[in-house]
Amino acid sequence: MNRFVQSTKERYVPEDLPEFAIRENTDDVIIIGNPDSETLYQIPQSVKLGSRVFRSTRPVASRSVQVAVRQAAVLRPQLTRLLHSSAPHRVIAAAVNPNTSASLKVGDQLHGYAVTSVEDVPELCLTAYKLRHTRTGAEHLHIAREDSNNVFSVSFRTTPSNSTGVAHILEHLALCGSAKYPVRDPFMKMLTRSLSTFMNAFTGPDYTMYPFSTQNSRDFYNLLSIYLDATFHPRLRQLDFLQEGWRLEHADINDRNSPLVFKGVVFNEMKGVFSSPSAIYTRALINKLFPDNTYANESGGDPLVIPSLSYEELKDFHAQHYHPSNSRFFTYGNFPLEQHLEAIDKVIGNFEENSKLAEGSFVNEQTRWKSAVHDKLSCQNDPLAPFPDKQTTLGVTYMLESLTDTHENFTLAILGSLLTDGPSSPFYEALIDSGLGSDYAPFSGVQKFTKQSLFSIGLQGIAPDQSGAVQKAINMALKNAYTEGFPMERVDAILHRIELGTKHQSSNFGLGLAMNLNTYWNHGVDPIQCLRVNEHVEQFKRSLAADPKYLQKKVREHFIDNSHKLVIEMSPSDSYESKLAEAEKTLLEKKIAKLTDGDRAVIYENGKQLLAAQEATEDLSILPTLNVHRDISRSFKATAIEKDKVGGVPVQWSAQPTNGIVYFNAVTSLQTETFPMKLIPFLPLFSSVMTKLGAGPWDRKKLDQEVSMRTDGLGVGVHIADHHTVFGSFEQGLTFSSHCLERNVEAMFALWTELFRRIRFDDDHEHLKQLIRIASAELAASVPHNGHRYAMTRAASSFGGAMKMRELVSGMSSLAYFRLVAASPEKVQEVVANLKQIAELLLNGKRLRIAINGEAAAIRSSLATVESFVSNIGGSGEKAKVGEAESTTSAIVMPTLNASTSNEHFIFPFSTNYLSRGVFCAPFSHPDFARLRIASSLVSAKFLHREIREKGGAYGGGAKFDSSGVFSYFSYRDPQVTGTMEAFDRAGEWLLRTDNYTDAEIDEAKLQVFQSVDAPVVPGEAGLEQFLIGRTDEMRQEYRLRLLEVGKADIQEVAERYLIGSPALQSGVCLIGPSSEVTANNDKWKVRIVSQ
Ligand SMILES: [Zn+2]
């Protein structure tokens, strides 16, 4: 499962968890990204992907393309991350929890537990219950809240004393079968027997956590049973250790004479993780800031150390850590607590308390250094760096305070936000505006996942001789912050966002809570303290009122006078990869030299046994399952929406329990026949800078301030929606989104009005160049995390139409394009001219449509505001129809039967591959769509997963079928090429032969598809599917019935019609990965050299 990657900004969003890509995320309609090559307008042809445009991956905290979509224009503060996670979901006026023991009080005993505290937290509309399991000392936190998306999690404090990755490998092994459920990968198998909204496991630097969420009560207890058995009674077989951890094995399992190599899922996974400079940087940062406690070790495992872990050490680690006395249970939602406790007690009630275990996993605080420490690192070259000679990262990191001081850490989060977020912050001015580098260094801001929090700040993309200048700029910025303080309006803006954050409802609120509270709770901090947002705010205000220099003093205390300071300078080295490969080779040789003949015989046998085990069919009937017919309703609850024209513009609105927030969404579509093709590649750039340049009366800093005071940020994205019926037709344009407290609706629209009318494109071209560099760096950094998406988009682009457009605005070619624009600062005038033209063509009412969600009482006044907005921006309602993603049968017509069958290989300095091949099939409203959707889920779970992950050793793989009508095969962090391509080729055949699967397995595939079909929709997003992509409730109802009715014959039929052999509408394979013998000197492949 997924290692918890600390650099991921929104780590609990399933989107960021690639393994679950086979979950078939709901259709990605809105895409932000960037432009391509051929259309490149005034950019020399040589810039095409084939040339040496690329140079390597960028060290940025992983902000994925997806995240960027809804991530508003304003730099999202770390603080908001903290607060967002404290941001409610589905808060309904009377927040009394009907099912839960409203009568429970401190001292009550039930099911082996004693209630130790009961507290209401009105600002988050919840009641928190803390309990202790009397026999074992296990702690339990229950958050009762009127939210149907119930959450469970169990976590253990796992503090490794070396970098063998033992905690991480154990997490994998826990999922290799347990006493009651002796089947491999029960989580993966439950994916198709459940309606879970989230299932995963994470290994962090000091804990391992197993969370899930679901809206279905039966499902909850099914999953609970699996999770408890997996963690407390895993089989931990040696063969699984070899598969998941590491092993020596013959390259060809059947050939004793083939060379011995290292294999293992975690071994490969971690090699993949460290093929990104940002991962190398953040790892060093943590390891070196805390040299004297557990954080000095790489908890995920260092590929060069993993092979020293023994099976016995792993078993011992389980015994020491996965015990109730070292555990924390979390439950959340509207299901009753009593039943949870009863179920858990049945499993842990047989353990004895062992207080030594919690002592053993305790994290000692790092002693504060007397003086700063400097360190130099090297990493791989980045083929995507716009300036190859500017690839140095310089960062300064301070150790802050123990998480046990929750209020000080709350204050530090505010301080961190004041220092780094938004264009008026001291570090933005000192570093970003300086033009010295491309973007903040990874991890910039306050970070709280270690026992003592930290603050990091730095720049990436700098010239090697500028690191001194960057350090100086950092020191200067701190000094200025100390002497000058912060404008009160910025503090107010942050407090406003906190208020908004407590009211905004996200669908994964409970899960966010589980993750965030656990980092504190794991160290014995009372988690309820962290929930009391209002108390922290009040206390903060009091401190500020009592001492106007309060914040300045904190700057001095935590930064200027803080001697625990780590300076890291990281630069690329040409020999980085070869040295690493050499080190691995040496290690391998050493291991091999020690082998006796007996060892060799065992290795050979193990290899065969593993293969046999992978191929063995398992009895899965032992696993609990939901039942499609019983647990999935044949009809779904329609969303009440109303539509009308307001000022000539189509508007949709929906009255929802939004907790006093008004949500605005809009789409402006472009006419592909008349919109200049040369502007298409600029759409992503436009969307990423639109709200950052200033508008009307506001320069960029004042605009940012105004945005923060009135809203939670303004979002702009590139929109591509496939037409639901007319094949090959699609809508393209921009989306706009924001939300605000009811009292700020007019102010929010005033912001949009100015942005639609008067963007200040010419205020500050230097800043625009910097924004372009940042966008380019962020995109480049997304490749290692989203390589499969890039591969899928690229492969499908050969079908033209919307797929081609996606490639232009969010694919590989867009990366090259952004990099090019970033590397050509002298052309900023041309860029500006294009952006202005886009503004002129799109920012008006001509092809605009708007959606408003809010409380019934707020809708009327909001609509009046919409009306004046529309009249202010002009050109209303030329052609748009609400709720209908228009079919603009575009000039860029679908190519007919001759999709390119040539394979492409983009060479990247990664250690593993991402592959994809696409087959063009059918649009949404076609009856085959539902069949193909089920087929993709079936073949992923029952065939591709086994071939690509279990046998092939990849981290993930499967098939995805989405609104584009393209059936995409993919693999993720895959050591293979040929084997995976063969698996893709065989998938259709596998589906055709109906004896490969049972009716029950088709039902499982249905369950999996319904996880996204019936995913929770928060009030702020109700009705948006119809608004954005034009699928009406009637269409969805029809689709629903079709999904439920799919049978073997249907699968067989679509397999035959679309997927067998070499289908006419099949793309070539797109491979993103290191150079390979498979593609070199092979005329079936176009190799794109992307590194020097
Ligand atoms: Zn893993």
Image: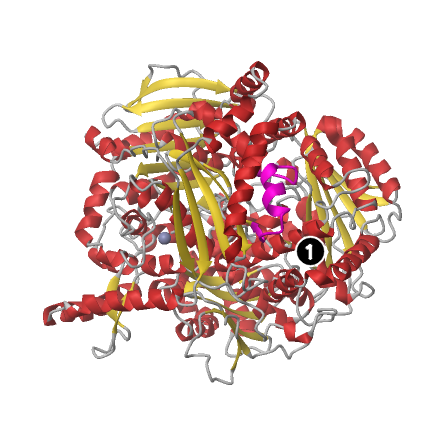
Q: Quadrant of residue 403?
A: top left
Q: How many marks?
A: 1
Residue 127: x, y in percent? 47, 22
Q: Residue at x 57, y 75 (%)?
A: 1066
Name the residue carrying label 1.
Answer: 685
Residue 567 in sight here = yes
Of the pair 946 and 925, the residue shown nearer to us: 946
Residue 255: x, y in percent? 24, 78
Indicate whether residue 809 is drawn in magenta: no
Of the pair 695 and 164, the residue shown nearer to us: 695
Considering only vertical position in the picture, is 529 above or below 946? Answer: above
Of the pair 330 and 705, the residue shown nearer to us: 705
Considering only vertical position in the picture, is 802 above or below 181? Answer: below
Indicate whether residue 434 is drawn in magenta: yes
Considering only vertical position in the picture, is 604 above or below 647? Answer: below
State which region is magenta: 420-439
Q: Residue at x 42, y 18 (%)?
A: 118
Please, what secondary structure does the residue beneath circle 1 have? helix
Considering only vertical position in the picture, is 439 above or below 289? Answer: below
Q: Residue at x 69, y 41 (%)?
A: 714
Quick check: 601 left or right of 790? left
Residue 1033: x, y in percent? 68, 47
Q: Quadrant of residue 706?
A: top right
Quick check: 1035 left or right of 306? right
Residue 65: x, y in percent? 58, 54
Q: Give the residue type at disc 1.
A: Leu
Quick check: 637 left or right of 226? right
> Is the image coloured rainbow, by chain, by secondary structure, or in one colour?
secondary structure
Q: Residue at x 52, y 21 (%)?
A: 536
Residue 24 in sight here = no
Crowd band around label 1 with a 10 angstrom C-alpha radius: few (<14), some (14–19), many (20+): many
